[in-house]
Image (spheres, rainbow, N blue to C red):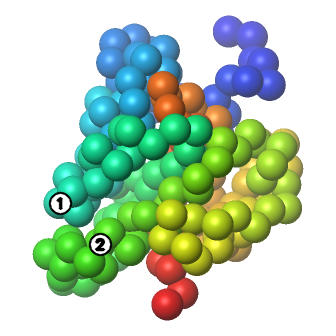
Amino acid sequence: GATTADAPFGPACSGVPKSGAGSFDGMAKDPVATAASNNPALSTLVTAVKKAGLVDTLNNAQGITVFAPTNDAFAKIPKATLDKVLADKAQLTKILTYHVVGQPLAPKDLDKGSFDTLEKAKLTTSGSGESYTVNDSAKVVCGNVKTANANVYIIDTVLMPSS
């Protein structure tokens, strides 16, 4: 199909289902945590969000941006470390809220940006066109995904707050 400035972009977008609740059209109708739960590539993130008790927080927030790590991003974390984090609600909440910016970010906003997260620490973005990185480490693999209440940028690395 024709690409528009408003369409999702990036290499991982091709892995998104073409139709149904997990498709771009389907995700656009649901709030962000619900939309993510329909995307198979985000199942670890969804598990983490549920464990942290953040489903309602994310679904009820208005006009947010979520940097959503893929299952592969979580798989880069040694299993023992990940299991420990998933069992520590406070630490998990800190990490997850660090992936959420309290304003809607368009791709052009990411060219060179620094944004306050819900965790309070800042994250930085850089790049242009269809190539962006977050904190100079995480690559956006499918960006500008719309949900009912959030813009989602799917990333290949879990972001860790500096604190």
Q: Position of residue 10 (x, y in %)?
A: 64, 39
Q: Give how far across and how far down residue 140 sits, in percent.
A: 62, 52
SS state under label 2: helix
Q: Residues within 10 Å of mark 2 (few under 14, many from 20)?
A: many
Residue 122 occupies quadrant:
bottom right
Q: Are marks 2 and 1 in contact (CB under 8 Å)?
A: yes
Q: Is residue 83 visible?
A: no
Query: Is 160 drawn above or below residue 142 in the view shown?
Result: below
94, 131: nearer the viewer: 94
Tell me if 66 is positioned left or right of 22 in this view. Answer: right
Place residue 21 in its image quadrant.
top left
Question: Which residue is drawn at the image coordinates 17% and 60% (left, top)?
Answer: 51
Amino acid identity at mark 1? Lys
Quadrant where the N terminus lies? Answer: top right
Name which quarter of the figure residue 15 lies in. Answer: top left
Pick whichever of labels 2 and 1 is earlier in the sequence: 1
Give coordinates of residue 22: x percent, y percent. Answer: 36, 24
The residue wearing badge 1 is 51
Q: Residue at x 40, y 30 (%)?
A: 31
Q: Amino acid at mark 2?
A: Leu
Return the mark for residue 21.
none
* Observer-nearest of 131 and 50: 50
Q: Is residue 44 above or below residue 143?
A: below
Residue sitting at x 43%, y 64%: 97
Residue placed under numbered mark 2 in the picture = 92
Q: Nearer the viewer, residue 67 or 148?
A: 148
Q: Residue at x 21, y 57 (%)?
A: 53
